[in-house]
Amino acid sequence: MRICFVCSGNICRSPSAEIVMRTLVRRAGLDSEVEVCSAGLGDWHVGERADPRSADALTARGYDASGHRARQFDRGWFDDHELVVAMDRSHLRDLRRMAGAAHQDQVRLLTSFGPDATDEDVPDPYYGVVDGFADVLDLVERYCAALLDEVRPRLRA
C-alpha cells in the first residue's frame, strides 16, 4: 500500500505526517507492505528541507527529519497511491478536484481516521507560534496511529 500525505508546501504538516507514519509502520514491522511519502500542492518549496521549527518539534520527540526534501504533488500519483491524505479541508477540496471521478475514494482528510474522527483541519503552524508545531505533531501522531489501525486489516486481505 502506498500513502501520500499532502499539505500546501510540504515543509510542515505533510512531512511531519510522513515521518511519523513511516516510524509507526516500521515499528509495526510493516515497512515492506506500506510505503509512505508526502508532497505539497504548491511548488514554492520544492527541494527544501522541512521547516526548522517542524524539524525541531519532530527531533524533540525522537523523529529524524533530516532526509526530507519538499516535492510537489503530481496528478499522476493517484494511479500509484491507494491513499492520498489531505492535511486540511482546502487540500481535500483541491485534491478531489484533481482526482476526478476515478480516484475520489482515495482522497481522505487525516482527521477522518479512527474513533476520534472529525472533519477538522490540521492547522497550518507556518505563520503561528512555535508551540503550534508541537500541537500539529500531537494531532499527526494521534491520527496517523488511527490511520495505521485502519490500513492494517487491508494488508492482510
Image (cartoon, rainbow, N blue to C red):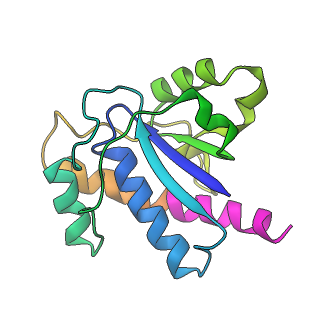
Q: How many marks?
A: 0
Q: Inspect the magenta stretch and tell me whether residue 151 lies in it.
A: yes
Q: In the figure, is residue 3 to the left or right of 136? A: right
Task: Tell me where the magenta segment starts and ends, as one range.
Answer: 144-157
Residue at 33% over, 57% down: 137
Residue 7 picture location, percent across and down: 40, 36
Q: In the figure, is residue 119 to the left or right of 42? A: right
Give residue 41's quadrant in the image.
top left
Would you place residue 89 above or below residue 65 in this image? above
Would you place residue 46 above or below residue 114 in this image? above
In the image, farthest residue toward the right: 157
Residue 155 picture location, percent across and down: 76, 67
Residue 36 picture location, percent across and down: 52, 57
Would you place residue 97 above or below residue 152 in this image? above
Residue at 22% over, 49% down: 49
Tell me the chief SS of the magenta region.
Answer: helix
Quarter of the image that includes the C terminus:
bottom right
Q: Inspect the magenta stretch and tell me whether residue 122 lies in it.
A: no
Q: Nearer the viewer, residue 123 or 52?
A: 52
Q: Nearer the viewer, residue 140 or 28?
A: 28
Residue at 25% over, 34% down: 45
Give residue 102's quadrant in the image.
top right
Q: In the figure, is residue 77 to the left or right of 71? A: right
Quarter of the image that includes the N terminus:
bottom right
